[in-house]
Amino acid sequence: MPTTTRLLKQIFDPYHQSSEKNWEAFASQLQEVQYTKGQIVKASWKTEKNLYIIKKGAAGIFLWKENHALCIDLCFENDFFSDYMSFLTQKPSPLYTLCLEDMECLAISQHKLNDLYAQSKTGEKIGRIAAENLFIHKQNQQIELLLMTAEQRYKQLLDKQPALIQRTPLKHIASYLDITPESLSRIRKNIATI
């Protein structure tokens, strides 16, 4: 099984198991792209052209507000990555997407994704699963922000991404947690003394 097909199967199998042939058809619509650390993939007030699956690397989704960047999402291997609202509406948005590490991604344009949907029920199901996955991720993120302390959210983030500190600037982690870098330093000290 080709590497891309295997990756798609790994990502989608928990939600929908399909034949190798279906995953190969999906893989044929994807383009391999690479970005470098610090590269802006989609600028503010531009329209998102692609939906990405990160094969290797890390990225963030940001909003510029009052002279500083707010991190609204962190994305790592096997995550979907995109200004998804702009991708769906094909309209500009204030969000920008930034590589936090060198990245290797699989990209699909909205046109090719719509072709995939039209080709088969499996294509539609794959698209629905991706959209549901992105919605669930954002909904969980909002619930956690309202119900969990910053320390609890930080510990949960470390559980999911043990190398987070080595891979992501602390200012972006703090922004993602909706706290100041100083508060994050205190949380990190508290955890270290436990």
Image (spheres, grey):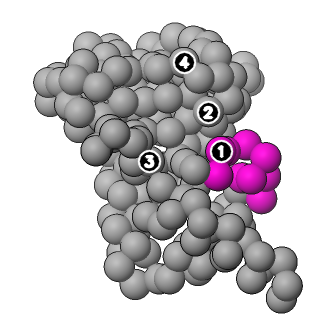
Amino acid carrying label 1: it is Pro
Q: In which quarter of the image is the C terminus?
A: bottom right
The residue singled out by tag 1 in the image is 169
Q: Check disc 3 and give the amino acid type.
A: Cys
* Sooner in the amino-acid sequence: mark 4 or mark 3: 4
Residue at 40% across, 84% down: 147
Question: What amino acid is at disc 2?
Answer: Leu
For the residues bearing labels 2 and 3, Cβ distance under 8 angstroms:
no
Alpha carbons under labels 1 and 4: distance apart: 15 Å
- Mark number displayed over residue 39: 4
- At 85% from the left and 85% from the top, the residue drawn is 193
Residue 100 numbered mark, or none: 2
- Mark toward the start of the polypeptide (2 vs 3): 3
Q: Is residue 155 above or below residue 80?
A: below
Q: Is residue 66 a member of the stretch shown in magenta?
A: no
The crowd level at tag 4 (other Cα within 10 Å; few <14, some 14-19, many 20+) is: some
- Please report whichever mark, 3 or 1, sits nearer to the chain's N-terminal start: 3
Read off the magenta span: 162-170
Q: Is mark 4 on a helix, strand or loop?
A: loop
| Labels 2 and 4: the sequence-earlier one | 4
Q: Which of marks 1 and 2 is nearer the N terminus?
A: 2
Callout 1–callout 2 Cβ contact below 8 Å:
yes
Name the foreground residue: 121 vs 189.
Answer: 189
Where residue 148 appears, x then y in whole percent? 47, 82
Q: What residue type is labelled 4?
A: Gln
Q: Which quarter of the image is occupied by the N terminus?
A: top right
